[in-house]
Image (cartoon, grey):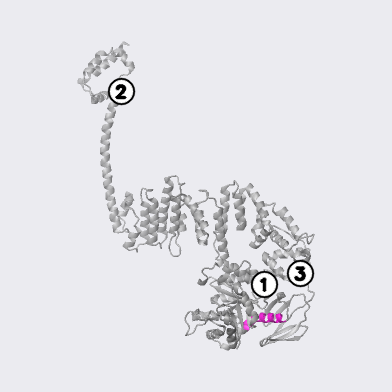
Amino acid sequence: MKLFDAHCHLQDKRVIDKASQLISAALAVGVTNFAVNGTSEKDWNLVKEMGETYPSVVPCFGLHPWFIADRSPHWFKTLKKFFETTPTAAVGEIGLDKGPLAGGIDYSDQLVVFRPQLELAKELNKPVAVHCIDAFDDLLEIMRSIGPFPAGVILHSFNGSAEVVPKLAELGAYFSFSGWFTYIDEKIARKTLKSIPSDRLLLETDSPDGLPKSDESSSDPKPTLNEPANILAVLDYVANLSNMKKEELAELSYVNSAKRERDVFIIAKLLVALEIDSTFLSFQTSNDALCCSRRKIQPVLSIDYTMTGGSIDAKPNHDSIALVLVSTQRELSEMLNSKSQDLDLYVKGVHFHLNKETLAKRSAKVTTLLESNKLHELRWIIRDMDINPSIFHLVTRFCYGYKIELSADNIVSVLCIAYYLEMSDDHSSNNLLNKAVTFLEQRVLMSWSETVKALCICSDKILDKLANVGLIEVFLDSLIEKALNDTRLLQDLITLPLRLYEPLILEVSKHNVSLENLVASVCNYANRWVFEKDSGDGSVSRNKREGIEAVERLLPHQRGTISSGFLFKSLKESIFLGACSDCRKGFEVRISNQLDMARAKDLQILSPTEDGSYDIELLKTILKSFYSNDSVPDLSRFVSVARMLEEFLLEAAASDAGLRVGTFKELAEIAVAASCDVLSYSDGIYRAIDVYLERHRDLIESEKMEACRFLHCKKLSPEACEHASKNEKLPLRIVMQVLFVSQMQIRDKVAREMKGVVERTENQVDEVESMSKKLLKLEIEPDYMKKRKIENLECVVHCEKKKTSVWREVKRKFGCMTSSTMDACSCHIKKRKTYHSYK
């Protein structure tokens, strides 16, 4: 009975000192090979040394998601060098982890690290060990975009659902089970095993972790270290659940592993023995045949080799090389051509079969690589530029002498390839670089729309290459010049990548341009790239976080230039995306500067989270900033904010059925504090309390009192008091307080009315006296009448002899004298009548 431990970590510092004993113990129970998986740059050398020391070890190199934070800037180049120098190696352990043990690891960063490693396994046609926890949907999507994987994707310690198995198997996945499998529910375990195709099942130990569960062991597999020999316990458990004999399952898993890691491992060992550089070899497997195509220019005789029990016997044969793996005959044919001019390249999975000399005539870089016998490095150059197959096909057509059509869609990528492959005047008069630069100057940079179109489709890698050669500044200068002439064009820039959009807007904002157009462009950019629905992709979330931070930096601080609704929405998104503190603070300051312009619905940023809580501290921070702002000019702004908070409290009470009493009380406290000494009445607070009690009729009396804690009955209007006095939902104590306030209001009203009567009477007396004084002044004869005093002396003397009073004079003026007192008046009248008669 032979077994293959498909996944372990014998390089782990906890067991590396006794790795020799562990391997010997495992060999003794039938384990013939061990796939030892590296997890970080720190242990790759240990894995490499272990593969060179122990013939049974299959070394695997990869960056585990738990250790991505410690990676160096050049980790991927280092990884590729390990594969170049270790032809026996597979890829692993790589992966995605959304589980609790990876809670502090940035998932978007995991995606950034995982994808290129999986692409590398595909390109090198090597098996790859994948760690996946709660991320099978993302894994499936990525595998579909890169795969299929003929060399196999080994899902080690598989814990996914049975439903996802067929989809993964179609892409070349294998499902490996370790001691961790013994700890899950037996019913689920049976269902999972039933879904696994028999030719896709593998066994492993994941040692020194994943100790299989037993009657004596604890329920937690972590306390005791595991070892490869314990694969027998995994075999027993899986065989029992699968209703198979142990011998059958052992043979099945061994044959499955031989299809992938063991075949490549043994072939690579053979090539090392033959001193053949496997960097120039590609492996393909199909059923029982495994073929290796040779592409190195070196005269080598084909030889028959038979490998049995770990020994290699050479038998010259000029037709082929054959391998016997264990008891199964496998044929390996190698096509040799000492003067082959063929070059095979894969660009994002698309195969290109090219002639080396033809490429060398157009490219100085290819010539150099060809002369130094390093043409294989060309694949890394193409890969690093992230070129699409269609663009590379265009370049190869140029090399073969065909006419090509350049456009805004392809000019940037063509420029990058031409520059890095050194397709310039120095190497060829008819060169691609000169042709591309001429097209850029005459057809692209002269047009606003063509320039934007050329840039908006650029990937980050292409933009990196552009920046390295100084072409980014050329594009930006062209766009800035045109945007300053017409700021309405800024709307078109929202299609650009952030790394281009932000410097463009910053540069334009330094000039005296329309803030309206600038703000509109930034807001539209946020709507397009930040506020759109999240797909759940970690890289997308990271891009959104960078986007919202850039939006904050680009927005002006002038009051009223940005709508309050947009600011609140941006603040909410910055909190959700985990943006930096400066970004969040910037939105808070802008909101506080124009808080009186906001509406109650804008405060939905405080909407309850999953735990039903509101961000009370955020609201307090904004209000504190608003009230401490020295630029607040008048009381009307405070009134607007107070009314808005009352409306928000009312909406929260009406719309949130799960609003807890404590939270409602905190919101009410804030609203009351804002309206104190600003609003005459607290009717808005009362309405919110009334609605809250209506929606929460199951509250006990003490909870109702808590909800009404900040209700100031003395500030209720008479109408509100009348309603509250009849409100059965209110606690009895509150109703009594309202009734008392109502009585006090009635008493004060009566007192004011009585006081008003007295004041009116006194005012009337004052008015009469004032009128009397005015009348007396009117009785004083004018100057021009003094000349006639002599003529009227008799009448005047008569009048002076009479005793006069203020009241008598008033009555005389209004004709209220009696007949006994009419003589003075009659005399006066008669004199006037006589005078007029004389006239």
Q: Which mark is residue 81?
A: 1
Is the magenta region chiefly helix, strand or loop? helix
Determine the residue located farthest toward the top in the rendered image.
Answer: 838
Rendered location of residue 398, percent (x, y): 76, 63
Residue 639 in picture, x, y percent from top left:
41, 48
The quarter holding residue 413 reads bottom right
In primary-sequence order, the first of circles 3 and 1 is: 1
Q: Which residue is mark 3?
A: 370
Q: Is residue 352 above or below residue 559?
A: below
Q: Is residue 794 magenta?
A: no
**What secondary structure is found at the residue carrying circle 2?**
helix
The mark that comes first in sequence, 1 or 2, is 1
Could you tell whether 582 is left or right of 837 in the image?
right
- Separation of disc 3 and disc 1 at Cα? 19 Å
Give whichever of discs 3 and 2 has the lower sequence position: 3
Q: Amino acid at mark 1?
A: Lys
> Vertical placement of 714 versus 383: above or below?
above
Depth check, front residue: 219 or 405: 219
Q: Is residue 327 above or below residue 752?
A: below
**Residue 267 lies within the magenta run:** yes
The residue at the point 54 percent across, 68 percent down is 105
**Amino acid type assigned to the residue bearing label 3 in the image:** Leu
Three-letter amino acid code of the residue under disc 2 = Leu
Residue furthest to the left: 820
Judging by the rendered image, the residue that carries numbered circle 2 is: 778
As helix, strand or loop, the secondary structure at mark 3 comes to helix
- Tell me where the magenta segment starts and ends, as one range: 255-273
Of the pair 638 and 821, the residue shown nearer to us: 638
